[in-house]
């Protein structure tokens, strides 16, 4: 491949873009066009309908997004109901108790699902993978539920 062919294929769009950069200072719209041979043209004027705007002037574009905005603490309205500290502690304790019960129930269900899978694997005949798939799915479901409950309980500690 010749240097001229290499420039036309790979470096030409980059060179055109670099040539177009001074136009950005003039706050104009920059278009990227594709000609009938597949070549790329960067211009400040729309040549035809195939041209797409790649850079717009500040008047025509949205401002660049800034960093992630910090959450602004908004005060509660004066008439907003307040919960007594003891009442909230009681509610949190009740919630923890319910989550612990749910985790224990899920653990028992997981153990039963594992026993059911062992029974299915002990049976002969048929396609074992198809026969045991629902049992494996049940085990996976209970394991995911236990993980979610443990995560919730971890927020109390």
Image (cartoon, rainbow, N blue to C red):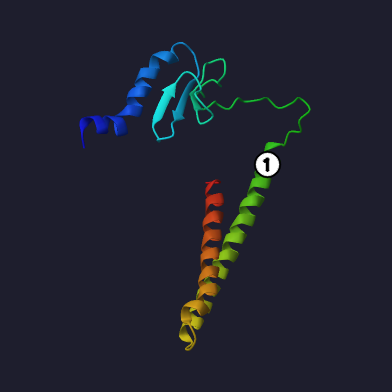
Q: Is residue 67 visible?
A: no
- Secondary structure under badge 1? helix
Q: Is residue 120 above or below residue 3?
A: below
- The residue drawn where x is 39% and y is 32% is 39
Q: Is residue 9 left or right of residue 34?
A: left
Seen as rendered, the residue at the extreme front is 36
* Relative vertical location of residue 115 with respect to residue 49 in this rendering, above or below: below
Camera-nearest residue between 25 and 131:
25
Task: Residue at 36% x, 23% y: name it.
Answer: 16
x, y (%) of residue 68? 51, 27
Q: Residue at x 46, y 28 (%)?
A: 33
Which of the pair 76/41 is nearer the observer?
Answer: 41
Give coordinates of residue 8: x percent, y percent. 30, 30
Q: Is residue 84 visible?
A: yes
Quarter of the image with the N terminus in it: top left
Quadrant of the rendered structure where residue 110 is?
A: bottom right
In percent of width and height, residue 88 lies at 68, 41
Please, which residue is most extreme toward the left here? 2
- Based on the displayed image, in which of its 4 quarters is residue 12 positioned? top left
Q: Which residue is situated farthest in the top direction here?
A: 26
Towards the viewer: 42 or 85: 42
Q: Is residue 56 left or right of residue 17?
A: right
Instruction: Where is residue 129? Give x, y as percent.
Output: 47, 77
Question: In this image, 109 relative to 1: left or right?
Answer: right
Rate crowding at label 1 as few (under 14), some (14 to 19) or many (20 or more) other CA atoms within 10 Å: few
**Residue topped by disc 1:** 88
**Residue sitting at 58 percent across and 27 percent down?**
71
């Amino acid at each position: 491949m010749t240097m001229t062919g290499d420039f036309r294929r790979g470096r030409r769009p980059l060179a055109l873009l670099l040539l177009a950069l001074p136009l950005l200072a003039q706050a104009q719209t920059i278009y990227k066009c594709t000609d009938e041979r597949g070549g790329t043209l960067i211009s400040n004027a729309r040549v035809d309908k195939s041209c797409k705007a790649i850079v717009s002037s500040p008047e025509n574009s949205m401002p660049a997004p800034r960093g992630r905005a910090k959450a602004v603490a908004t005060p509660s309205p004066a008439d907003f109901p307040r919960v007594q500290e003891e009442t909230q502690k009681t509610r949190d304790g009740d919630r923890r108790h319910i989550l612990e019960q749910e985790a224990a129930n899920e653990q028992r269900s997981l153990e039963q699902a594992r026993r059911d899978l062992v029974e299915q694997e002990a049976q002969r005949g048929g396609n074992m993978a198809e026969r045991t798939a629902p049992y494996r799915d049940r085990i996976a479901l209970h394991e995911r539920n236990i993980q979610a409950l443990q995560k919730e309980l971890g927020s109390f500690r």
